[in-house]
Amino acid sequence: MNNTVLELENISYKYKNDLILNKINLKINSGEKIALLGKSGSGKTTLISVLNGTIKPTQGEVKLFNKSYEKLDRNQKREITTIWQDLRLIEDLSAEQNVNCGLLAENNFYFAFKNLLNISSFKKAHKYMKLCRLHNSIYDKKIRKLSGGQKQRVAIARSLIQESNILLADEPFNNLDPKLITTIKNLLLENVDKNNTRKSPKTALVALHRLDFLNDFDKVIGIRDGKIFFNIKRNNLKKIHLEKIY
Amino acid sequence: MNKLKLNYTSLSFLPILVCIPLGYQLINNIHFGGFKLFQEFLISAFNPKIDNEIIITVIKRLNETILIGFFSWLVSIFFGAIFGIISSNIFYKIFNIPNFLYRIIRFFLTIIRSIHEVVWGIILMQIYGINFSIGIIAICIPYIAVNSKVFAEQLETIDYKSFESINQINAPKFSSLLTLIWNPIINTFKNFGLYRLECSIRSTVILGLFGIGGIGTSIFLSFQTLNFRELWTYLWSLAILIILSGLIFKKIKFNTTNKILSIFFIAVFFITILFSFSYFLYFIFNNNFENFDSVSSLFKSSSDLGLFDFLKLILETIILSLLSTGIAISLPPLAIGIFNNNSSKIFIKIFAFLLRLIPTPVILLTLLTFNNPSLSLAALTLGLHNAGITSKLLFTNLDSQDKRNYIAMKSLGISKKTSWLLGLFSQQAKSYLAYCAYRSDIIIRETAIVGVIGSVGLGWQLQESLSSFAWQEVTIVLIAYSSIAIVGELINGKIKNSLT
């Protein structure tokens, strides 16, 4: 049975005269946890942006659930959530308002309006913020007043609250201390927690720099100069593979 | 020999050279018949008329002024925000609408903005007759366009990455739009909206001089009857209104985290908008056109305006704008630099406040008491009024500036004037010039007011054409006005960009 959820067919992306992605073919199956490795500027962020539909490839096709991205309806597109490397939070809104932005897709315009007026329910937002170890004293603080680590966790909470099946994360453990990294890693990569209080993404593609996290992944993809150099099971990863991309 | 190098500081002073031709013409046009009147005008400032009758009139007139000013402000800020949204590229990105549409809307708004509210007022009065609502509509038309530009500029500052992030969540388009624009809109309203209320009140006063009503009408009537004591009662009461409103606005702080207060503000805002808008619709559909039968009358009317005369009027308007801008740029730093002591500064501040307070037509009419009408006199009037505004900004910026350089220079034995110039003003010159570039846009539009009163340029021609219902001429003059204002805006935009 074909359980491919995301597929890139011969994807190239050119920005001005630079070829950022070069004929990439990739299949991501349901339930897979994939680590994306590569140097800075190798094309990891662009690949994630192509996968979530933010960037239209110059060539090739992106398919989600075997359907071309353009043909998907809003509900289907909601199956992907992204944690951006640069977080992309709205600076003038509070932490809880930013997390609630993750619920915009499943609610109507009135919810967005209430969220901005601070009169919507923040129950679910608080639940995910708590899971991300955010203290309730920062819930109503504006993003610009938070530390780097707090902002990082707000962005993660905003992503998790969407309860999407597919997670695309671009270096999500930046700015976090070692203890928090373990908590956040479990949140992002464990399907269901013991108490069944949350829904985590089944499938994940995470861009990483730290190799000591690889044990939590099933597969590893290595990218260099916009080309996939290897796409293998984690157990098969050898030093030679890493030398190719670093 | 060294080449002359222009920097921002020297560029701020150089335009004062316009005073040479200006002064020459003014001296030649001087007449002594009206000096007594002018003297009487000045003395009356210290002896305004105060009795029961005039206090009742002042309250009544101020009420009218506040009402026109407030309603026009409210409607123009609301629709300004809406047009700002639909003329910003974020709207088109979210809804995937072709970008050329927003260029068309922007162009359309630029044309509307280029025509001063007084011109709109005069035209509407010709069509509908004198009416209280005309004042509100005349102010709203250009103000909506002005506000929309400010809102659109703020919306352009939205981080593209925030847009991508919200867009990727795949929320309903309107939810994404609202979430992205909410804070820029609220911040623009906080920083700019309340200042626009003051502008609305000032415009109401100027329109009042042309018969719309409010305190402006009383000012004009007392000037016509040369009742200067009464005139100053109105001017001082207007000053109190402006100072009070400024103080109140400083105290008002919009706390968006207070839920009940937020809902209350929004409810009041929307109810007032709904009320004002329904009133407008009622007004428009229940008024007969008095003098303007249909668009076809544009083509039936004839024009006696010769090409040469017309070009001369355009040239006059451009020269008027340049001369006024020169005065508005250079006079404040020159005056502050030369009279650089505390008591002189207080005097300059009071004088600048009076120049801002007294409507330009009144300044012009006062100067006409001892000088023949000329382009120079109109330029001087417009220049002085705007110098009052640019000096306010310059004082505010200089007062808040770090004075360590200035103190250090003085401690080296450098003179106070030179220390001020190099240690204080030179650091402000760039931003000051950028603001003056923006101000010159407004000066171009304001040439219409002094033109009407001072018999100069296109403003005068517009008045003449309207009086004779020569609609074709009116259209030509308006097109010329718009073209000058649009070209001026483009040039000033380039200057502003290079300065910021």
Image (cartoon, grey):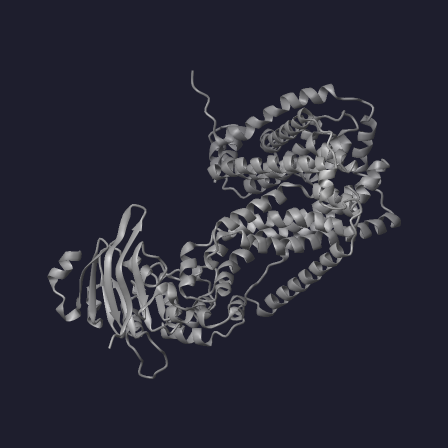
> x, y (%) of residue B485?
60, 37
| Front position in the image: B25 or B87 | B87
Q: Dividing the image into 4 quarters, which one contains the N terminus of chain B?
A: top left
**Residue at 59% over, 41% down:** B393
> x, y (%) of residue B411?
48, 32
Q: Is residue B88 above or below residue B330?
A: below
* Rendered image quadrant of residue B338: top right
* Rendered image quadrant of residue B385: top right
Q: How many marks can you see?
A: 0
Q: Is residue A55 above or below residue B499?
A: below
Question: Is residue A51 toward the left or the right of residue B9 in the image?
Answer: left
Q: Is residue B222 above or below residue B31?
A: below
> x, y (%) of residue A155?
38, 65
| Front position in the image: B500 or B340 | B500
| Front position in the image: A54 or A76 | A76
> x, y (%) of residue B336?
60, 33
Residue B346 showing in the rendered view: no
Q: Residue furthest top?
A: B1
Residue B475 showing in the rendered view: yes
**Residue at 62% over, 56% down:** B78
* Rendered image quadrant of residue A126: bottom left
Question: Is residue B43 toward the left or the right of residue A152 in the image?
Answer: right
| Front position in the image: A173 or B473 | B473
Q: Is residue B155 above or below residue B172?
A: above
